[in-house]
Amino acid sequence: MTRDEFATLIEEALTLIPEHFREAMRNIAIIVEEYPPAEILTEMEIEPPDTLYGLYLGTPVTERPWGDGNREPDQIVLYQGPHEEDAVNEDDLVAMVAETLIHEIGHYFGMSEEEIQEVEEQFWAQQDGEGD
């Protein structure tokens, strides 16, 4: 899949994430890279067969001072290679990208891993319900 095709897929995945996430996001750039750098995997203690699908780079909203402004956009980096390698088909790929976006946007909002997991579970329950 080309980078442009993956970018189109990201746009589709964004329509699947919770609406309140989409509406509350401000000043975030979504960047696509082929694979996570080895130094990031080492730093995060991620070893094969595990991988990294995405990464949030920025300051969570909950940690910003009241008058915070005029800053460079926070970034969500999506790693195209691991997504493509682990997806069963294109529909699965869209859902995987949406889940990664949910997870990284959750970090942007300062949510705990448990809170993010709850949103992800709701997302998958909704996805499973659409096939009924």
Image: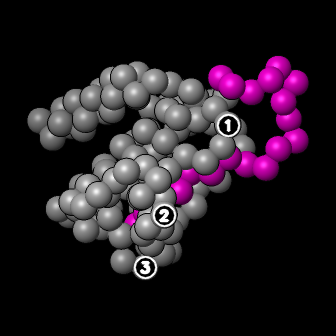
- Give left or right: position of 42 versus 74: left
Against 97, residue 3 (above or below) is below
In the rendered image, which residue does mark 3 sit on?
A: 2
Residue span colored magenta: 62-80
Inspect the image, locate mark 2, and give the three-letter code of the amino acid beneath it.
Answer: Glu
Task: Give the CA separation, mark 1 to mark 3.
Answer: 31 Å
Label 3 amino acid? Thr
Tell me the tag on residue 39.
Answer: 2
Residue 33 visible within the image: yes
Residue 45 left/right relative to 30: left
Whether residue 93 is visible here, answered yes or no, is: no
* Closer-to-camera residue (103/4): 103
Q: Earlier in the sequence, mark 2 or mark 1?
A: 2
**x%, y% of residue 45?**
37, 51
Mark 3, mark 2: which one is toward the viewer? 2
* Frontmost residue, 117 versus 24: 117
Task: Name the image quarter holding residue 6.
Answer: bottom left
Relative image position of residue 32 (x, y in whole percent): 52, 65
Tag shown at residue 132: none
**Amino acid at circle 1:** Thr
The numbered mark at residue 59 is: 1
> 17 or 76: nearer the eye?
76
Q: Quadrant of the N terminus?
A: bottom left
